[in-house]
Structures are given as structure tokens and as C-alpha cells.
Amino acid sequence: MAFVVLGVMSVFSAKYRPLAKEAFRCVFRTVTFRPCDTGLDDRIKAEVLSRVMRFSLPAARLANRHFQILSWIFVLLTLGSLAYSALGIYNFYQYGNCDGPQASGACILNYLTSDYGRFSSPTELIAPNDTANGIVAGDLGSNVTAVEFGCFTCPYTKQDEPAVQALIADGSVKYIFKPFPLPGHPYSRDAANAVLCADRQGKSWELRKLVFDHQEACAKGGVLPIKILAENAGLNMTQFDKCFDGNLTSSELDHYIAQGKASHIYATPTFFINGKPFVGVKSIEELREAVRRAKAGR
């Protein structure tokens, strides 16, 4: 039991590595049917009991009688905590949320995405009142409106783009994209302003696709690759440069950011389908199911 705990602790601190080696020797001798000759178990027990005795003698006596049971309890709690943490990290990497693809709750790891310094729980998410402004696509007459707050240099917004495009292609929803650049994602605001400038020429979707396709280049290279992509999207570069360099869309972008903050957005992408929030990467099946429920009034 000590080997498991000390082995984990030794990863983070060199202080525990000699103890971990000693515990390994004890485990090895035990599994080869030889007595443990290090005395580590007795030293650990003595150390623990001496600390407990400072606060309560009856508690120390109880711990002494049931020390092995208590040891197993702490080992299981340690292993369970490590497993749960590892699962959370995997889910965050894979789905953008600690709790997996179906989750809509807050994740402490979302702090890594620099979400304007606030956290929300699902009950705090508020659907935006404005479902008219944004980059619009799909069936404008649909009774289901899907609003997405996304960041152009956020890997999770990019990861969900195929599902979003498939949902739009279904032709069953009115889709509205509201740029929500996260400060922790390099050049996210520049990319958002570029797409808004492209929208003024009716080519936002062309540039949006290129920005997501070349997200890493935009996040590392900034303005230059964004302008090259704008030219590749077929934009009138004289008009684009005037708009982009003159920050003509900054007030519009600030309006979308203010809407996102008012909605308590804490991660991207965040969807509101007829007002119901969905946080993180969602599959096309999940989005279609949400639309089906919205059409049924649920």
C-alpha cells in the first residue's frame, strides 16, 4: 500500500523517491514469499500514530487497532482520485469538458482556455436575447434557432465545425454564429475581425473555412497568414485591408463578446438551441437530437 502512495508522490517530489524504492523492495520480498526487512511499514505506522496522538489519544488507539484497514481506505481513495483526475484530463482533451461529450457543466480545466476570468454552471447559462444578429445560415424561416458562440483559434470550436456544417446542410435550423474570441487563444480577436470584415463582402463562410483549415498557422503567425487566407478566399483586398486595418468591425465584435459575457459563456463552443445550452464539442447526432427535441417543444 505504501508503495502505491509513495510511488505516486515520488513522481512529483524527489523527497519521496528513496521511500518509494524502499517500499518497492518490501513489495517485491512480500510477493516472493519473503518477509519485508526494511521496517518501512513500522516507521510509517509510528509516524502516523505520533501525529494523531498530538490531537487525540483515543483516536490514536483506534488508528492503531485498525491501521491496516485505514491504510487500505486511503490507498483506494488515492487511486480513485487519480483515476477520476485522469478521466477528467482525457475528457477535457478529447471533448473540451471534464465530464465527457454529453456534459454541459463547468470544468475547472476550462481555466486553461482563458474564459474572461469567470466560471458558470449550466443553470447560470442564459440564452442571448438577440437571435437576429450574427453570421447567419440555414433555414431562416425555421422554428428552431441554433446560436453558437465560438472562437476561431479554439481547437474545440474547430473540432466541432464538421458537425456544425452538417447541421446547416440539413436545412432544418436557423443557424447564427457569434464570434467569442478567448484571450488565451493567440490572434483569436484578429481572426474574428477578419471573418466579420469578410462578411461585409458576403464571403464570411469562405474565410471561416480557411481559418479553421489553417488554424495553427493563424494562431502562430497572426495577421500575415490571416490576410493571405483572406486573399485566397477571393476577397477584395483593398476593401478588406480598409476594414481590417481600420478596426471597422471592432465595435460589432465587442457587442458579441458582451452578449457572451451576459450569457455567462465559460468555454467554446457553446450552443443555444431554442435557448437550451450545450457546452463543448457535440457530435452531429447530438445536435440533431437537440433539434428534434426543440421541434417537439421539449
Image: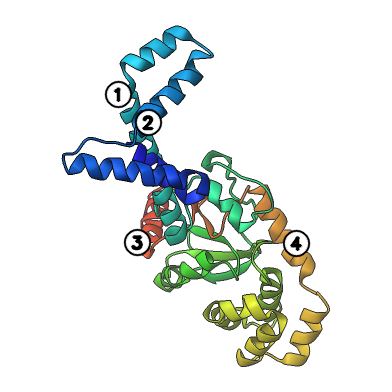
Mark 3, secondary structure of its residue: helix
- Number of the front mark, 1 or 3: 1
Query: Residue at the location (59% across, 56% down)?
Result: 112
Per the rendering, the mark at residue 74 is 2
Residue most extreme to the top = 58
Amino acid found under the numbered disc labelled 2: Phe
Amino acid found under the numbered disc labelled 4: Asp
Amino acid found under the numbered disc labelled 1: Ile
Q: Please identify the quadrant where the C terminus is shown.
A: top left
Q: Nearer the viewer, residue 294 or 194?
A: 194
Q: How is the image coloured?
A: rainbow
Query: Residue at the location (42% across, 52% down)?
Result: 294
Q: Nearer the viewer, residue 153 or 289?
A: 153
- Number of the front mark, 1 or 4: 1
Which residue matches tag 4? 254
Mark 2, secondary structure of its residue: helix
Q: Position of residue 53 (x, y in %)?
A: 49, 14
Mark closest to the chain's N terminus, 1 or 3: 1
Per the rendering, the mark at residue 141 is none
Please determine whether, in this image, residue 230 is positioned above or below residue 255: below
Per the rendering, the mark at residue 285 is 3
Mark closest to the chain's N terminus, 4 or 2: 2
Per the rendering, the mark at residue 69 is 1
**Residue 26 appears left or right of 250:** left
Q: Few, some or many C-alpha atoms within 10 Å of disc 4 (few <14, some 14-19, many ≥20)?
A: some
Q: Few, some or many C-alpha atoms within 10 Å of disc 2 (few <14, some 14-19, many ≥20)?
A: some
